């Protein structure tokens, strides 16, 4: 139906219906986009949580390995120090 055949009242009603339809369509599109965005956001947050968990685990492993290496080095150094101290004590003739 062409608008030029309609009365002003009919044109107004038709325009109002068109605007209402556009509003409704826009609301549907916006809701769909929002749902899609929320889903993507949740997915990204889950990936971030997994990444943070993996990172925490990796850091713990590295720290444990460094601590074990440090303890081994420390024990070696203490054993060397004991040998040196024992050697020095024996050289000076001092008994502990």
Image (tube, rainbow, N blue to C red):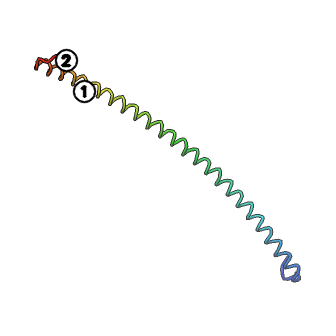
Q: Decide if residue 36 is on the left or right side of residue 65.
A: right
**Residue at the left extreme of this rendering:** 92
Q: Decide if residue 20 is on the left or right side of residue 69.
A: right
* Image quarter in which the N terminus is found: bottom right
Question: In the depicted view, which residue is nearer to us: 93 or 83?
Answer: 93
Helix, strand, or loop for circle 1?
Answer: helix
Q: Quadrant of residue 65?
A: top left
- Residue at horizontal 69%, vertical 54%? 35
Q: How many marks?
A: 2
> Residue 91 at what x, y percent from top left?
10, 19
> Residue 71 at what x, y percent from top left?
33, 28
> Residue 86 at what x, y percent from top left?
18, 19
* Image quarter in which the C terminus is found: top left
Q: Quadrant of residue 9?
A: bottom right
Q: Which residue is mark 1?
A: 77
Q: Which residue is mark 2?
A: 96
- Residue at horizontal 24%, vertical 22%? 79
Helix, strand, or loop for circle 2?
Answer: loop
Q: Give neighbour class at mark 2: few <14, some 14-19, many 20+ (Cα, 10 Å).
A: few
Question: In the depicted view, which residue is nearer to us: 77 or 22?
Answer: 77
Distance between the Cα atoms at labels 2 and 1? 20 Å
Query: Looking at the picture, does residue 8 appear above or below residue 54?
Result: below
- CB of mark 2 within 8 Å of CB of mark 1? no
């Amino acid at each position: 139906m062409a608008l030029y055949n309609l009365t002003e009242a009919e044109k107004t009603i038709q325009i109002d219906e068109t605007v209402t339809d556009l509003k409704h369509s826009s609301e549907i599109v916006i809701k769909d986009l929002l749902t899609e965005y929320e889903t993507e956001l949740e997915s990204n947050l889950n990936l971030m949580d997994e990444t943070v968990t993996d990172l925490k685990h990796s850091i713990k492993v590295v720290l444990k390995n460094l601590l074990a290496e440090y303890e081994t080095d420390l024990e070696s150094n203490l054993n060397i120090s004991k040998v040196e101290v024992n050697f020095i004590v024996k050289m000076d003739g001092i008994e502990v």
